Amino acid sequence: MPFPSLPTADRYVLTNATLPAITVDGFAGPSGREGLIDADIVIADGKIEAILPAGSAPTDMPATDLAQGMVWPCFADMHTHLDKGHIWDRRPNPTGDFPGALDAVRTDREACWSAADVRARMEFSLKTAYAHGTGLIRTHLDSLPPQHRISFEVFSELRDAWKDRITLQAVALFPLDMITDEAFFGDLTDVVASHGGLLGGVTYLMPDLETRLDMLFRTASERGLDIDLHVDETQDHEVLTLKTIAEAKIRNGFAGAVTVGHCCSLARQNDDLAKATIDVVAKAGLSVVSLPMCNMYLQDRAPNRTPRYRGVTLFHELTEAGIPTAISSDNTRDPFYAYGDLDPVEVFREGVRILHLDHPLDEAARVVTRTPADILGRADRGRIAAGLPADLVLFSARRWSEFLSRPQADRIIVRNGKGIDRSLPDYRDLDPLMKD
């Protein structure tokens, strides 16, 4: 059937909707279909006025019958790299592996990342994410000097320009071995604090890792900054800094939020070491985000050989231990990942397959909605509840099999109760930037 259109009135009702129960607060309808519930949603003046049992909404207002189509909250994409996005045509990575990606990005950054270049590519990405239904994004920004000053300034400008469409957060990404450069790290911290960002970094095995982590945690505590780290993005089982990070948070009594991304090598550990690590991560109160599409693309890659490993962390075991877990887009059309479109539906669909988030699917929808929103400190996002803005994504799919079998290209994005133009930006818009 054709997808129904939305009423133009300020107050209307979406009837006969199907909602993932894990995304709904304040309403508990009967559920017998892997966590899906039936409801009517009353929308007034851009907000959700009420969530009612299906068929019980007042009949004295305009209505759209969704014919059991799913309704989700807008998405939270909590680990992206907007500054790197869309440079593949300019700087491809022919080997498709991690060292090749590092080299290509380094070359491109040094040659091309002016404020104008970064701004144009970041805005292209934001237009794309908005059209797909994302309302909250955290991006990591390459922060080697002088790039940290260029990119954070551009980020702040775009954060202000997009504040009514997408809420943006930024993390400074730098090699942790540079933390002992007092002039650089002091300047970086000043830039991050002045732009309301987070401290990040990349951890790997080094003799004085604990000392460097102590410096990071102390500085973050003194400046009131949260932390978001790239951790163990490798299939090398000898690399496991995750436990050291958790212990450092505990040792320093750090009260801020700490997020760790990737954590791939955890899946290569024996059961005893993996459990011991997960126990410390839970005790420390870390949050974990997995990037299944990018890491499956990059890792265990060798010419003319089939990959053996999926490149993801122990997602189910971390979740079972009470650790907040989410998935996200990561890189988009750059040397670290040649594909992607900042579409959380694609991320979710592939995440379900790669991480086995199904059978049952009762709580799966949380990994791109409420959990990443909570990790990012925005408990007002990624859920459907009376009183919240009517920021919704409407699908024709009625059941999980339908939802996960097609890309849902016919979805309707509702922001503040009104449907938006879902036109995606044209890649040709980036052509002027693709000259080295």
Image (cartoon, rainbow, N blue to C red):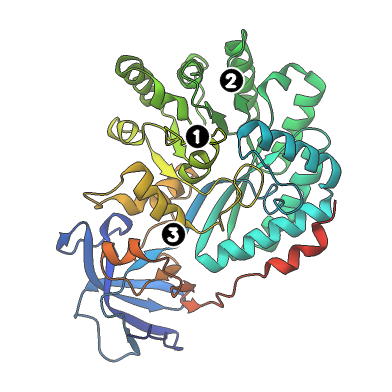
Q: What's the residue type where badge 2 is placed? A: Tyr
Q: Amino acid at mark 1?
A: Arg
Question: Helix or strand or loop: what does disc 1 sit on?
Answer: loop
Say above or below: 12 vs 151: below
Q: In the rendered image, which residue does mark 1 sit on?
A: 305
State the quadrant of the N terminus: bottom left
Q: Position of residue 177 (x, y in %)?
A: 69, 19
The answer to whether residue 385 shows anywhere in this view is no
Instruction: Tell me which corner region of the image, top left, top right, bottom left or bottom right, holds residue 42.
Output: bottom left
Residue 57, given in percent of the width and then of the height, sits at 24, 81
Type of residue at label 3?
Val
Identify the residue position indicated by label 2 in the image.
Answer: 204
- Seen in the picture, residue 375 relative to 400 is either above or below; the reply is above
Q: At x 40% / y 23%, what residue is drawn?
A: 268
Q: Nearer the viewer, mark 1 or mark 3?
A: 1
Whether tag 1 and tag 3 are in contact, CB under 8 A, the answer is: no
Say if 380 sits above or below 29 in the image. above
- Residues at marks 2 and 1, CA–CA distance in whole angstroms: 27 Å
Please tell me which of labels 2 and 1 falls first in the chain: 2
Q: Is residue 433 left or right of residue 174?
A: right
* Residue 107 percent location from the top left of the image: 80, 38
Helix, strand or loop for disc 3: helix
Mark 2 is surrounded, within 10 Å at the Cα level, by few (under 14), some (14 to 19) or many (20 or more) other residues, namely some
Residue at the spot 39% in from the left edge and 27% down from the top edge: 267
